[in-house]
Amino acid sequence: MALSLQEQLLKTGLADKAKAKKARQEKHKKAKANKGKKAPVLDEVKLAALEAAQTKKQKDLALAEAQKQRRLEKEIKAQAIDLVKSNIQPKGNGDIVLNFTDNKKVKRMYVNTETHKQVTQGRLVVVSIAADEYELVPAPVAEKISQRLPDIIIYQATEDKHEKAASEEDDWYADYEIPDDLVW
C-alpha cells in the first residue's frame, strides 16, 4: 500500500510530527467551516429540467389565454346571433326591391312599402347571420349587435353629411323671395 505524502515526508525527515499534526488540524477546521456554508450544487441536468418546466409553464399559460379568447369570441358571436333571432322583423314579402351591398356585391330583398320606408329612414337595419340569408332588425338592436359583432351589420341607412350640408345651404336661400318675372 502506498503511503500518503505526509507519511513519506515524515519518513524521510523533511517534516516533523508537530507540523503534520498542525496541518491535519487546519485541514479539519477548513472542512468543518466549509461544511456549514456549502451551497447546494445544481448540476446541469437539474438546471435543464427547471428550464424546461418553466418554458412548459409559459407555453401552457399562452395556450390557456388563447383558449379563453376563443371562448369569449364564441360567446359574443352567440349573443349577437341570439339578438338577431329574437328581434327579426317581418319583411312583408312585397313587390318593392330593397337593394344593398354585401362584400361589394349588390343584393336584393323584396319588401312591402312600409318596410322599405323604415329601412330607408334608418329605423330597420339589414343583418346577416349566415351566408346569403338577410334579416331586418330594429336600429336600437342593431346598435347592440354592432357593439358585439359589427360584421353582422350589412346595411344601415344613415344621413349623409354631404346631403345634410347641401340641405342647409338650400335652407339659407329659403328666406329670400324669388321674383316671378325672372326669365331663365
Image (cartoon, helix red, strand yellow):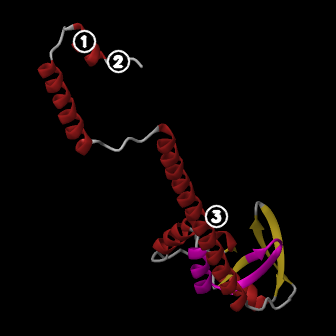
The foreground one among 42 and 87 is 42
Residue 157 appearing in the image: no
- Residue 111, image x, y percentages: 81, 85
Marking on residue 11: 1
Q: N-terminal of the two: label 2 or label 3?
A: 2
Residue 161 appearing in the image: yes
Which three-letter amino acid code belongs to the residue tagged 2?
Leu
Per the image, the residue denoted by label 3 is: 184
Displayed quadrant of residue 167: bottom right
Residue occupying image coordinates x 57% and y 81%: 144
Q: Secondary structure at mark 1?
A: helix
The foreground one among 67 and 17 is 17
Residue occupying image coordinates x 56% and y 75%: 147
Question: Quick check: marks 1 and 3 in contact, CB under 8 Å?
Answer: no
| 110 sits to left or right of 34 | right
Q: CA distance from mark 2 to mark 3?
A: 134 Å
What are the residue bounds of the magenta stretch? 128-148
Measured along the vertical axis of the image, is residue 19 above or below residue 133?
A: above
- Residue 58, image x, y percentages: 51, 54
Per the image, the residue denoted by label 2 is: 3
Residue 54 falls inside the magenta stretch: no
Task: Tell me if mark 3 has few (under 14), some (14-19) or many (20+) residues whose alpha carbon lies within 10 angstroms of its own.
Answer: few
